[in-house]
Structures are given as structure tokens and as C-alpha cells.
Amino acid sequence: MLKKLFYSASFFILTFLVVLLIMKLIIQQSIPDSHQAFIEEKGWDLAFYFPKKEPFTIPEYPEPLETFYLAGVDFTGHEKTKITRHRYRIEQKCDIRYLEAVILSGDDKIIGSYIDASDTVPGIAEMVEKDDFMKRGYCLN
């Protein structure tokens, strides 16, 4: 009886590990190499979460456009481009908030990027190197 319980528990753990391995491979395959290289080039580490991919519309009002401009995103020349927003969770936290690297792409090229802090309005900042981001005082830790 104890032997069957041991085999059952071992099988369950092995199955769980195989599922995690498959999920990790699927996540890695869903991230374009150029995006992963861009994020890692800035010193950020991607967390183990499914990336989000969604259509993005350029804001029409000056306030959000100014917010994006201050975060280093310039939409000049991309008004007619179909833009896709890719969100990637980052390992580093900002206080108790999660950080996401957001990459805006159009025509298979990166046209802009920024860091998005959860539960913060507007919550976006220029995507700079990780050390520089932490020195700017966005986070308390």
C-alpha cells in the first residue's frame, strides 16, 4: 500500500514537472527573438508568465500622447500603421507593484517601448536600463 502511494505521488510530481516544462517552452516560443533580445539588452529579466498580445490604437487626445512621448514613445510616421502591443511581465518588482515591459510593434518592427507599473496611473515610464530605472526613484526598493 505504501509503495503504491509512493509511485502515485512520484507520478503526480513528474507529470506536474513535465507540464511546467511544456508551458515554459510554449512561452519561450511565443516571444519573438527581437523582443526578448531588446528586453534583455536593457538588463531586465522576463518572468514566467504568458505574454499578452493585443491591438493598439494611437490615442487621439493630447494628454495621453504627451504621456507616451514622456515615456519615449513617438508615434510620428506611424499613424497609418497597424500597431500591436506586446506585454511581458518582468521579474523585478517596483515596491509591491508588478512591472511589465511593453513593446509596440508595427510592420514587424519595434516602434516604441515603455515600462508599465501595475495599479498606477498613468503608470508608464521610459524603458531604460534596469539600473537607471531604479536610480530614477520610481521604486522605493
Image: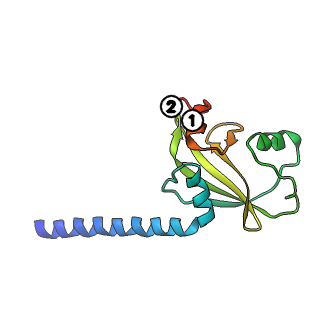
Q: Is residue 21 left or right of residue 97?
A: left
How far apart, in angstroms, are the residues tagged by discs 2 and 1? 8 Å
Is residue 17 something one can see in this rendering? yes
Residue 1, visible in the rendered structure: no
* As drawn, 58 above or below 133: below
Q: Position of residue 124 (x, y in %)?
A: 69, 41
Q: Quick one: SS at disc 1?
A: helix
Percent from the top left, x then y, of residue 14?
A: 29, 68
Residue neighbourhood size for the residue with mark 2, other residues' Cα within 10 Å, grouped as few (<14), some (14–19), many (≥20): few
Sort mark 1 into few (<14), some (14-19) or many (20+) by Cα contacts within 10 Å.
some
Instruction: Point out residue 123 in the picture as x, y percentages from the top left corner.
Output: 68, 39
On screen, residue 141 above or below 4: above
- 59 relative to 135, above or below: below
| Circle 2 residue | 141
The residue shown at (81%, 56%) is 57
Residue drawn at the location 60% of the way across and 44% of the way down: 129
Q: Which residue is mark 1?
A: 134
Please report contact status of discs 2 and 1: CB closer than 8 Å, yes or no. Answer: yes
Which quadrant would residue 35 be assigned to in this image?
bottom right
Q: Residue at x 33, y 69 (%)?
A: 15
Quarter containing the N terminus: bottom left
